Amino acid sequence: MGFYSWLTADTHEPINNRYSRTPHERPVYLLRPDGPPIEERAYEGYGVFGGHRAEIVLATMNLPEDHGLGTTDLFFVGSLLSTTSGVYHTEHPGFPLVASSLHVPNRAVADAIAPFIGGGPIRTPFARYDEPLEAFEGRPPNFLTRHAFWQRAPWTVPRPLKFSFDPAARYGDLPASPGDPNQGYFF
């Protein structure tokens, strides 16, 4: 995985990484709803802010305290919540299948993200968007969404990632930070 980044929630400025031709000369803050912001003085471009992986912070902010997941599974949950949308079979909206461009390593991760797709427990295995599905005559999720057999639906993430260059910014006052199409580097 290469560089990736976000735009700030309040000013929509990109969070440039330190290898960019235009790196930031000021700290950026990963805001949290229940705690002080996490300060990062020189963003490397790989999702780490003040020693904390943004994906793990996202997962931790949204899962119950007794989730029981280890660091690796938390990373996968946060990665899925920050980059993927759920996919539903249109004839069976209560029977969600989640297709992902990322690998879903185990049932614990699948179960952890199930509440975010609004369909209860996931009763079908996860799949990549290009992975043929036996239950659907070998058709991959991309085909099924393209030809209106399925419809994509975004996650419902109650506490999304939010970043700001303002240390006094408040999590509850801002919208989610969108991903940076320039990956914090290409300007």
Image (spheres, rainbow, N blue to C red):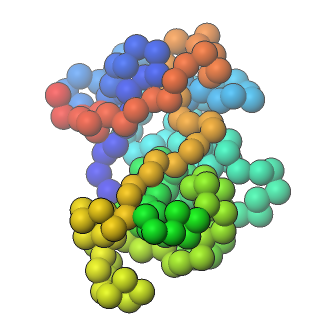
User: Residue 84 lies in what quarter of the image?
Assistant: bottom left
Q: Residue at x 31, y 45 (%)?
A: 3
Total numbered badges shown on the rendered structure: 0
Give x and y (percent) for residue 79. Answer: 49, 54
Image quadrant holding the N terminus, namely: bottom left
Which residue is depicted at the point 57% across and 55% down? 117
- Could you say where residue 127 lies in the image, as x and y percent from the top left? 42, 74
Residue 120 in picture, x, y percent from top left = 66, 63
Q: Is residue 96 visible?
A: no
Q: Nearer the viewer, residue 119 or 63?
A: 119
Looking at the image, residue 182 sits to the left or right of residue 171; the answer is left
Hey, which residue is sitting farthest right in the picture?
Answer: 66
Q: Quadrant of residue 39?
A: top right
Q: Residue at x 30, y 86 (%)?
A: 138
Return the residue nearer the eye: 154 or 180.
Answer: 154
Quarter of the image that includes the C terminus:
top left
Q: Residue at x 55, y 70 (%)?
A: 95
Is 113 displayed left or right of 23 in the figure?
right
Percent x, y of residue 18: 32, 31
Does the image show residue 180?
yes
Instruction: Determine which quarter of the picture holds residue 139.
Output: bottom left
